[in-house]
Amino acid sequence: MTEPSILGTGPIAALATPAGRSALGIVRMTGDGVWDIARNACGDTVSAEPWIHRQATLVRVLDAVGNVIDEGVLLPWAAPNSSTGLDLIEFIGHGSHAGLDLVLQRFIELGARPAKPGEFTRRAFIQGKISLDQAESISSFIDAKTGAAARASLRVMLGGLKSELQSIQHILEDNLALVELELDFTEEELHVFDRTSFIDIVSGIQKQVSQLIRHANASRFLREGIHIVIAGEANTGKSTLFNQWLGQDRAIVNEMPGTTRDYLDAALEWEGIPVRLVDTAGLRKSAETIEIEGIQRSQYLIEQADVLVWLIAPPNFALPDEALLTDERLILVRNKADLDSATPAYNEVDIPIEVSASTGKGVDKLRDHILANILHGASLENSLGLERRHGRHLNSLQNTLIQASELATDGASEELIAIELRRCLSEISSITGEAAGEDLLHRIFSRFCIGK
Ligand SMILES: Nc1nc2c(ncn2[C@@H]2O[C@H](COP(=O)(O)OP(=O)(O)OP(=O)(O)O)[C@@H](O)[C@H]2O)c(=O)[nH]1
Ligand SMILES: [Mg+2]
């Protein structure tokens, strides 16, 4: 159930900066009458001049008996030109949590209600200032762990996804209108819906949607990082590669097979993507008890990996099991390329990547290859930070577009094509929030912090 206050426009207030020690802190209020509440809180420490939209004023906030709580800057924003679309006040005071809390309590005494998590952003969404995908990107921007992830969320926040979806939506709406017109005039000899050009248009949109799906796939790794596991038989140079990528001698390297007993992991960042790199115990049959335990762990880690770098090297060219060979997470790498030893020919198995972990040759190239695989051709330069939810709707949109195009090709009736087009439009509305239900909105906005 929605609480009525959530949907209202009454005054709400919250601390917008973290409850810690800082130079400055901000208390925000938005809703009907917040300028009056702020003015009442400042008493006659401010002049009688009316405040002006976006004009900062130095003020003192007073408690109920007239004692000064804090001195700071008050920034008023007039509806509809504020971030929430409603009147808004920002009080920028000293970064004392206790002091700011007194300011907040004073605003509450004078009529504001404490804001719920995400309520400012939710109001912005309700007032039509932002779409749902933009609101979600604000939360992702705040949670971003790397600069690249922050930039990707920012692109969505500034409307990068919304504008693309809007352009697709307009084209689909125009085509739906033509299909419906055609349906209205079935009796007459009037043809306004041209199937050939419709199929062309849908194919263009499919390309755009594919690109967005690539962004959605890449976003998962930008947000959550990539889990790379280096595996292979004993003595193939796994620990050497691990050290090479780390830039330090973390793992013990030795010519004795079975050197790594337990796995080692390290956190890196590759082009703004967080990477968890794992070196595992080499697989081999002649292992004894402790090593067997290590090998079992390797097998578990292999299952968990996003990317599995499987090393082969002379004289040990053993490939992974059949099941792993066809696993799309697998990258087969031939190590010790500096040794003059030919790689045996495998039936139908191509080993395109060669490195020398000890000299470092080819190691950067392998890294780039992994990133390109993970990003599916999307570049980080202009990547959009999309949520899993967006990815799901984009995939459904793509399937529905394919369906619509096939119907048009097969000469199906306009009624059926219209149904698919309406489905496409509904997938788009689910992303931008025009068709979002209360449960989804609650789930999304409750992820926010208070004051945002
Ligand atoms: N020539 C050459 N030797 C390498 C290369 N990479 C690793 N080695 C050597 O191969 C031996 C095994 O290297 P490790 O990195 O310990 O191999 P590992 O796969 O971790 O071995 P285990 O932990 O026993 O499974 C060491 O003597 C390394 O110096 C390489 O690129 N070229
Ligand atoms: Mg090792």
Image (cartoon, rainbow, N blue to C red):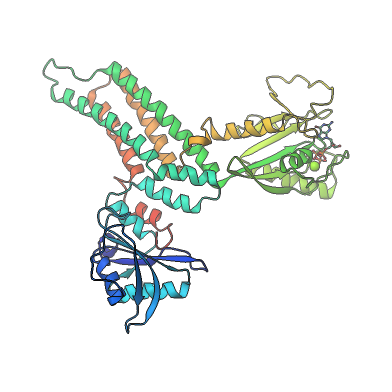
**Of the pair 6 and 134, the residue shown nearer to us:** 134
Quarter holding ligand 2? top right
* x, y percent for residue 173: 25, 31
Q: Quadrant of residue 47?
A: bottom left
Instruction: Where is residue 79? Give x, y as percent.
Output: 25, 56
Can the viewer see residue 222 in this picture?
Answer: yes
Q: Nearer the viewer, residue 209 or 301?
A: 209
- Expressed as whole percent of the image width and height from the top left, the position of residue 77 reads 29, 58
Asked if 418 appears above or below 8 in the picture, the reply is above
Q: Quadrant of the C terminus?
A: bottom left
Q: Is residue 368 left or right of residue 311?
A: left
Taking the image as shown, residue 312 lies to the left or right of residue 205, namely right
State the residue in front, 48 or 353. Answer: 48
In the rendered image, the residue lying farthest to the left is 188
Locate residue 365, reporting x and y percent.
67, 30
| Closer-to-camera residue (353/184) | 353
Query: Is residue 110 at least partly visible in the picture?
Result: no
Task: Give the residue displayed 38% in from the left and 46% down from the top.
Answer: 134
